Image (cartoon, rainbow, N blue to C red):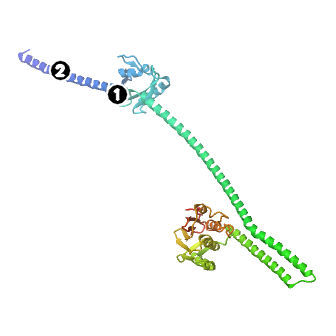
Amino acid sequence: MSKDEIGQLAEAHQVMLSGITSVISRLQQVNQNLKLSEERWQLALEGSSDGLWDWDIPTGLVFLSCRAQHLLGLEQTDKLLPLRHCLQQVMPEDRKQLSLLIRRHLKGKYPLLRAEFRVATAEGPSWRLLKGDSLRTEDGCRPLRMVGSLSNIQYRKNAERQLREANEQLESKVQERTQALAQSNQQLTQTLEQLRSAQEHVLQAEKQAALGILVSGIAHELNTPLGISITASSHAQQVLQETQEFLNAPAVSRQQLQGHMELLAQSLQLLEDNLGRSADLVRRFRTVDVENSSASQWFDVKQYLYAIAHSLENELNYTPHHLSISCPDHVQLFGPPTAFSQIITNLIRNSLQHAFPNKQTGELTLEVRPAETSLELIYSDNGVGMTPEVLAKIFDPFFTTKRGQGGTGLGLYILYSLTTKSFRGSVTCQSEPGQGARFLFSFPLKEGAAPVTPLQGGS
């Protein structure tokens, strides 16, 4: 071998040695990077409390990281373990389902493997989560390896169980409270029914009491004129018998006969007056039955007010009092006109009888104010007014402060009944001693309007 050939061979050897050195250096760098990557990955897994597993499918051996071995309850080892040995750590009731999920993933039915199962631990069964994916041949048909992670999900399962129990308890409490509420509602309904029944009984009792008062009042008011009528009739019968005896006597003086005739005329006049008073009382009692009042119709309020005032001129002309009326034209009200006339008449007569005992000059005022859905009527006088005790009873039947002086106690009661029943309206009264009286009426303008709950006495 010549010197030149030896030199070329040495040069080639040097180049090859340099290349090998470079390759080795690069391999070392790759190994170092790979080791660093594995360390980072291992640290990441340990930091996340997850374990790593790697299953070589052809050999059936599984690599388990330390964390994975701990999670499966295995003793620490560096050896690869058979898959069946690993599966033995799974609770029997979960093992079949885990094997089924693995087979379905290997067959391509699931792109990723995800399975939850329990393993036996010293503290009892504990839940784990298995995740993984498979590496296959280039044609994608045959799986070669499966790599994944293993996690402890017992805390999550505990939380889910606690949440489920809390929901069940909440549902139970909601159901219990719903039942309790239903029972309370039922009891409340029963209580309301009992209250309505009690109210009906009270109302019936009040009606019976009012009827008793009415009957007692009728008997009291009719007793005097009827008693006088009976006495007058008996006296007239006695006078007539004595007259008959005088006529049968042989001698009768004209003076005696005239005296008996005058006594008979007085008795008959007394009888007529008291029977007339009785008839008037009966007529006024019948007025209380407002359901049989005249037929309801639309009528002109102003026209009726002036007609009523004209009918009372004779009574007003004998007093120093003055009646003034303020009412717009063409104001219509639906109801029985006769009942309306009775209301206004009773108002005026009540003032004439009670408001001015000292015969002072009085002002009586009627004012009509149409509203959107009702007609407001205000009647007032400047008389002596009423005490609170009297004011509270003015609408009661047979209540009067003029007992024995011509007062029957029916005027304002008839007024109240006509207002609330015939017109389905309301009436209130405001009064103080020395300040006169003020009656406020509200009449619904629409036919068939719902009745307004009246306030009796006071304001």
Residue wearing tag 1: 48
Up/down of 81 relative to 165, above or below = above
Quadrant in which residue 262 is drawn: bottom right
Q: Is residue 432 left or right of residue 101?
A: right
Residue 259's x, y, as percent? 83, 81
Up/down of 137 relative to 276, above or below = above
Q: Looking at the figure, which quarter contains the C terminus?
A: bottom right
Q: Which residue is most to the bottom?
A: 254
Q: Residue at x 50, y 33 (%)?
A: 165
Front residue of 322 and 270: 270
Crowd rating for badge 1 (residues with CA inside 10 Å; few <14, some 14–19, many 20+): few
Quadrant in which residue 440 is drawn: bottom right
Number of numbered discs: 2
Q: In what element is the residue under mark 2?
A: helix
Q: Residue at x 78, y 74 (%)?
A: 271
Q: Looking at the figure, which quarter contains the N terminus?
A: top left
Residue wearing tag 2: 20
Kindly tell me whether residue 64 is visible in this rendering: no
Front position among marks 2 and 1: 1
Quadrant in which residue 75 is drawn: top left
Amino acid at pointer 2 = Ile
Verify CB contact (< 8 Å) between mark 2 and mark 1: no
Front residue of 346 and 67: 346
Amino acid at pointer 1 = Ser
Residue 302's x, y, as percent? 56, 77
Q: In what element is the residue under mark 1?
A: loop
Q: Is residue 434 left or right of residue 286?
A: left
Q: Residue at x 49, y 23 (%)?
A: 92
Q: Which residue is most to the left?
A: 3
Front residue of 118 and 102: 118
Residue 386's x, y, as percent? 58, 65
